[in-house]
Amino acid sequence: MRLILASASPRRADLLRAAGYAFEVRIADLDETPGLTETADQLVTRLSLAKARAIDAGPDDVVIAADTTVVCNDVILNKPVDAADARRMLRLLSGRAHDVLTGVTIRRGAQTRTAVERTRVWFAPLREQELDWYVASGEPVGKAGAYAIQGLASRFVTRIDGSYPNVVGLPTARVAALLALLGVGGGIF
């Protein structure tokens, strides 16, 4: 039995490793474009399921897949396409609360368990100089909502309600609960 993380995210790997899991990484390369009428919950669920199914694994292997997005005022904020897009997203988050959603799917053979974790995050109002500095840092690249709570953007976060690891990209307590539902856990990995 092997544990496989279906993600290229170094943050997810760090979180899983910190939670005491030994695993290998296999990348599921998918189009992550939201459907026209798809809600954020539907998007992260669909993508985590698709990633879990895209990984070639043996019948006893366990695959963990996840997808994270940010939602503010009903607008889905995935990874920014460029600096201008990152600035647009950060302006939307400035001085407001938003939700971070991660869809997690665990697959073992033909069995799958999927859940969505939601964490509420509040941002301080951002000044233009702060936006310029943060976007120039390069940190928004590849990050849902154009920020990394565990990095430089931590100075913008005034409060969170929910799972901190979820905001980083993988709700590890939820992963453990889903593994237990599939009969996996207790320090096996």
Image (spheres, rainbow, N blue to C red):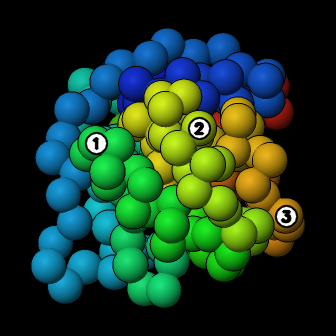
**Number of labelled discs?**
3
Q: Nearer the viewer, mark 2 or mark 3?
A: 2
Residue type at mark 3 is Thr
- The tag earlier along the polypeptide, 2 or 3, is 2
**Where does the image place residue 28, in percent across and percent down from the top left?**
27, 31
Q: Residue at x 36, y 19 (%)?
A: 26
**Where does the image place residue 2, in percent across and percent down from the top left?**
51, 17
Report the side of 159 relative to 168 (left or right): right
Report the side of 22 relative to 111 (left or right): right
Q: Residue at x 51, y 60 (%)?
A: 90
Labelled pair 2, 1 in contact (Cβ < 8 Å): no
Whole-angstrom CA distance, mark 2 to mark 1, is 15 Å
Q: Secondary structure at mark 1?
A: loop
Quadrant of residue 133 in the image?
top right
Q: Label 3: which residue? A: 158
**Where does the image place residue 56, in percent across and percent down from the top left?**
25, 25
Quadrant of residue 51 in the image?
top left
Q: Which mark is residue 133?
A: 2
Q: Residue at x 79, y 24 (%)?
A: 18
Labelled pair 2, 3 in contact (Cβ < 8 Å): no
> Outermost residue, front direction?
129
Residue in the foreground of this view, choosing between 27 and 40? 40
Report the side of 31 relative to 16 (left or right): left
- The tag earlier along the polypeptide, 1 or 3, is 1
- Crowding at mark 1 (Cα within 10 Å: few <14, some 14-19, many 20+): few
- Crowding at mark 2 (Cα within 10 Å: few <14, some 14-19, many 20+): few
Residue in the foreground of this view, choosing between 115 and 132? 132
**Where does the image place residue 95, in percent across and percent down from the top left?**
69, 75
Q: Label 1: which residue? A: 82
